[in-house]
Amino acid sequence: MLLGEQEQFLSYNGEVLVFQLSKPNHMEGPADNTANLCVRRMVFNRDTKLFVQKSSGAFSMRASHLKTEMVCCGCTTDSRTGIILPCVLLKKKKWNNVKYLLLLLHSSNQFEQSFHFKLDYELKEDIRLFAGPSVLWRHANKLFYISSNTSVVQSAPVQLSSVVWTGEIADEGTVVLGIRTACLPESEDADKFSLSDRATWGTEFFGYTIETQKVLPGTCFMPNAYSRVVSSVYVCKNERLKKQLQISLVAITRKNQIIWFQNGLPKGVCELPYEKPCSVKTALTSGNDLLFIVSFASENSCVVQRRDSLQVASKWQKVKSVLVDDFIGSGCEQLLLLFKDDSNTDVLSTFKITDLGGVNYTSGINYKHDVPAAEGLQENGLLTVKALEKRLQAGHTSVRELLQHLRLKKKVILESCRALIDLVEERTHILPNARQEGLVSLWDDVENPPPSLSKETSLASNVPEHFTEKLWHRVVGDSLVVGIKLTESSYLSLSDVSLSLVRDQDLSSISPIIKCQNKIIKLNKAFSALTVSSCQIEPPPKKLKLDLHSKGDLKKEFPKGSSRVQQNRAKTVIAVTSLSPLLAFHHVCCMVVLHARKEKHQNDCLQESKKITLLCGKILLSLEDISNGKYSVKMLRDNSFCTGSMEDILAVLAVSVKFSFQIVSSDCTLTPLNSWLLGAMECTPFKECHDHVFCHKAGNVYGTIFNWTLKSPFEGVLIIYCRNLTVLFQCLHSLTRILPPGCGIKFLRSASKAALTEQLALALEKEMLISKSSFFSKQTKAENSLTWGNKPDKKINDAAVASLLDTEEGVQQFRKKLQKEREESVLSMNQTMNGAQYQKIALKIAEAQLSSDMTVWRLSKS
């Protein structure tokens, strides 16, 4: 240390702040009358195991005929920002006038003068810094304080002999815990135990709140019996439970003891190894151990651990300062002990960083100063360490096995992803041997597959199957939309069609499979109607009458293996995924894989289906292209039409939610609705699809798609494709303004395919039961009306038959009678029915068929 310098140390966010105040040297002349307060930010380098300087700053003051000193330093909260900042209290003394300055240190190493004040005496007793920043001190058994908010010295209306702690208490703000002469109340309602306690000892603890100027009872901290011996206190925890203040603290006494108090009661005590303890602080280490660091006036320090009881864990001599912070960046606190070394001028040349556990960094330490606490404690510690070593070894073995298992799981998942990529790219993938990986194979490992199988596989992969017509992708908001248009001749089951996006980059830590949502959108070419899901409206009237006796007409109308719906619609499979996670890689290449079930048709019959997986192509994404709008949806107006392409329309529909409404007006026609769409909503129809209109109105409703279908001048269905419910409510609010009075709006819920399939099965069952019951009742009525077999003269007994069969004429007569009975039986089965009965049966069957036809149409629209 240079002559005329003062030093103080402070820990702040893992750094060591070294404050040095250089005084002017009057021996060299009056030329330089400035005093400089310098600060150096020192950080610990774990490689070199030394403290290195990170940055520095300085503050200059005129010091002509003034005696400048550093009083104290600490970390307090700046009330303007709520940020904890280092601060330094300086003193300038000139004759009997003493001026104090409080400086704040910012992260830029710039000092800021928070406030200053003048006194006619020097601060010597119980000087504390607290939030504000504020300064508190005791003088002539009175309490004074000043804050940056007032800059005026204020006096508390209390008398006290010492201040043992200052800090924050729940729901009370800044509280000063002090000791004063006991004030004995005259009321009879006072607690007799507390009254006798104070009368016996003559002193008591009390708490004083700075903000509310309220006095708290000191018994919630500790009994008044300790008020004559306690010199310093550290409150470890405070909270309120059911309006009761719960406080845990540790106190040091003039009897060289440290005592742990819980809710005002002593819970443990330990003898300290040195005399005259002056301060105590805490540290929470990596082992979740709470350490108490006690500093002594003789430049000694010790650490007390609290487990089952309070015990001295370690002690040191010739300690210049003890700091607590996370100096090595481990996430837990450590102790930094700065030792006195007269041979070296560097303040951080001799130090020790420890948490009494695995962290132990030393530099220039003479180990004879590390004195063991006690022999008995050392023996107990040795036995404890041996037991802990065995537990540690068992835990280390378990952790090693768990890590090996996790590595193996990760390897299996990555191998599965590579196999999937090779499958879609039609490459041969060779699985590793299970024995080499320490696994048991679920099937027999085949090193060399049979030649015939390999040949068939290679031949099958060389035969191309064209199921897709076009691959495209668009960016809509924060969503990436990828679509594949299927060919019209593809016999793919739409219930089993899906897309997968596989990242092409080989990233070992990230799964290549991209999570996405699949949709199927059908485009009706004949009417240019887009449908994403079905809604409850009537099907178009039937114009085709099938003759079940004419197979040729049926084959002409429905060619082999397909349906009318499949021929008139172009199908597009769409995958929607979030775009932002992909852009984290700046450039992304994704493979698009189609999963489907191919329907086999043979001799006009649907055979067993087959699952297929096809690589449809790759898409490339870059942040630069997206910023330039290369893949954005372009919806522009051109001669009262919207020029969006079919891919743009499908992309907007894929990220939108569909809502269907039935609008019925009993008094007026619904002609204003078209004017509302083209006028107030500023919609234009698509060139590709005139039935759908695109909203160009500025605001949230921009990009909404409408479809308005009139069933009659007084009834229609409005379908809205919008981004969210907020846009839907805005559209409906605007719609209700133009609708005629008495108009009703009904929300149509779209049924799922599973529900529609179940509904169709029930309708067909009902249709079959009605037909069966009608024919069964007719047959029963016909049988009851038959009388030819019940007449006595028609009966033929066995004797008559035997007599008739004896002669040729008898045989001829028996044959004639048998023929007559056969003709009568045929006539009985061809009974006629009247017109009313037939009309009733036909009406029941027609109603059942109408219900099943409606369900079939809704299912085809889904």
Image (cartoon, helix red, strand yellow):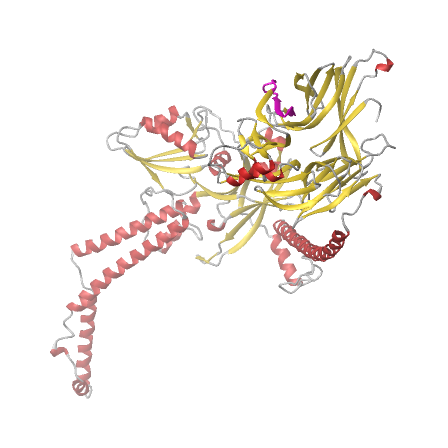
- In terms of depth relative to the viewer, which is nearer, 512 or 644? 512
| Front-most of residues 656 and 634 | 656
x then y, percent, for residue 361: 79, 41
| In the displayed structure image, the side of residue 283 where residue 469 appears, left or right | left
Residue 58: tell me if it is visible: no
With respect to residue 502, does 823 lie above or below? Answer: below
In which quarter of the view is residue 56 placed?
A: top right
User: Residue shown at 50%/34% (left/top)?
Assistant: 648
Residue 659 horizontal/vertical position (percent): 39, 37
Q: Is residue 201 covered in magenta?
A: no
Residue 582 visible somewhere in the drawing:
yes
- Residue at x 61%, y 49% (from the top left corner): 424
Residue 147 included in the magenta stretch of the image: yes
Q: How many marks?
A: 0
Percent coordinates x, y for residue 417 in the rendering: 63, 50
Magenta residue span: 136-153
Q: Is residue 550 left or right of residue 328?
A: left
Query: Residue 550: which quarter of the image?
Result: bottom left
Quadrant that contains the N terminus: top right
Name above or below for residue 487 compared with residue 55: below
Say which of 646 and 802 sits in front. 646
Screen quadrant of the C terminus? top left
Question: Would you identify the image quadrant in which residue 136 lies?
Answer: top right
Instruction: Give the answer, above or below, for where 20 lies relative to 590.
Output: above
Where residue 822 sits in the image (x, y, percent)?
A: 21, 73
